[in-house]
Amino acid sequence: RFVSFRTESSVLKILNSNYFCCPRIYGFGHYYHIEGSGESWPWPYILMESIEGITLAQFQKLSAENEKINNAYRNWKLHRQMRGLASWLAKIVKNIHMIHDVKMSESSVPIKCINTSVSERNLNGVSHHHWFEMFLRYQLSVALSAHWKRGLLSKTLLSQMETYILSNGGIEELYENLYKGGSLLHGDLQEQNIIVDVSNGSQLMPIDISTWLSSFDFVTAYFIRRCVEENITVDVISDLSDEQFCQLGLTKMGPQTRLRNAAKLEMLSVFEFDFQAKTMVPKGLIDFGDAKVGNPLYDLVALHLSSFRCSKSLLKEFLKSYGTPVENNRLFAPPNCFSRRAMKLCLLHPCDTIRPIQHYVPKTKKAESWEEIEQLIWSI
């Protein structure tokens, strides 16, 4: 029950001993930890430093709106800034990957073996190699069912999935021969967990949601109150679905669309986004609750599919800046195995990896084999 809490607190303590561009931890514990307090959940907490800036997801969203403006210079500068981010991430991530001797204990487990039937106590003292192996074997047992339930794959691809994963060395090639049993992994390098800032004093200033909503004559007091209660912000309103609007009390489609579009314009005007004057600066990484010890290649799945949005040019920049892999861990070697191993880890990943693949590389929707998708996503 406390794996994510123990993982994040343990990993942050390790990273805080050096400078790894992550929040500094000041303390952790439980609000209710005394028997008889009446609370069934102890409410674990971690008190940590706040990193100023916005998430890469927010930056990408704002930049996407600006891309609608036909300005070649802006698009060029955006790509240049993203390449700089990829290079910066490579150096930070490699430093994390160079940590190997992570100690495990019953009270502090710095890796997450998701949903296994084995208790933490029974796994205490098990080598990192076996932790990652158990994680992959569990994911293999549920992968086909998970992808089938999401309904994004054809029957042809579903029927080929297990054969593809077990071919050419199976899952063993993903955990065998790892240097010192494996590297420390962030575990979830998606765009929500990367913090960036914009120089020249530009900040994403908070907008009072009540005041902003009150400026629209079609918005009711009930809707405003519900937004305040649910901590809805202007940038969240721009992404609300029709169903979510209805749950908040705005049921008509016309007002929903008007409010959604107004929120997008408001975010752009407040941010004063101008690529000719502003520069995106990487600030740090957050959310180490999914950290593991295993194959460094695992970290590239969320990084490439989410943060890089399947951009091969950004992936190449990352690999170039990462440089020579940690000794003997075979992160990117042999070259002919890189794309295959990365694709296998995509299919074994606990998150939905197919949706971003199909969204950012539409050609994959018509693919008839996993080898074809592997080439479209990972071949460099």
Image (spheres, rainbow, N blue to C red):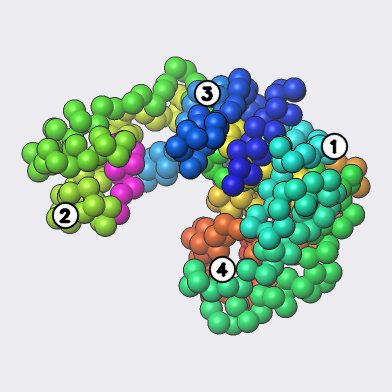
Crowd band around label 1 with a 10 angstrom C-alpha radius: few (<14), some (14–19), many (20+): few
Give the number of the mark in front: 2 or 4: 4
Residue at the spot of label 2: 251
Q: Spatial distance from mark 2 to mark 3, Cα to Cα?
A: 37 Å
Counting residues from the start of the chain, the first of labels 4 and 1 encountered is: 1
CB within 8 Å, label 4 to label 3 = no
Which residue was labeled with disc 4? Answer: 146
Q: Callout 4, which amino acid?
A: Ala
Label 2 vs 3, first from the N-terminus? 3
Position in image of residue 275 (x %, y %): 45, 31
Dot 2 or dot 4, earlier in sequence: 4
Residue 310: say if magenta.
no
How far, Cα to Cα, is label 3 from label 1? 28 Å
Percent position (x, y) of residue 261? Answer: 25, 45
Vertical side of 130 occupied by 159: above or below = below
**Relative to 56, is 126 above or below?**
below
> What kind of element bears circle 2?
loop
Q: Secondary structure at mark 1?
A: loop
The CA span between labels 4 and 3 is 35 Å
- Residue 370 occupies quadrant: bottom right
What's the residue type where badge 1 is placed? Asp
Image: magenta residue range: 233-241
How far is disc 2 from disc 4 in space, using C-alphas?
33 Å
Task: Tell me the residue that label 1 is attached to.
Answer: 101
Q: What amino acid does circle 2 point to?
A: Thr
| In front: label 1 or label 2 | 1
Task: Tell me the element at label 4.
Answer: helix
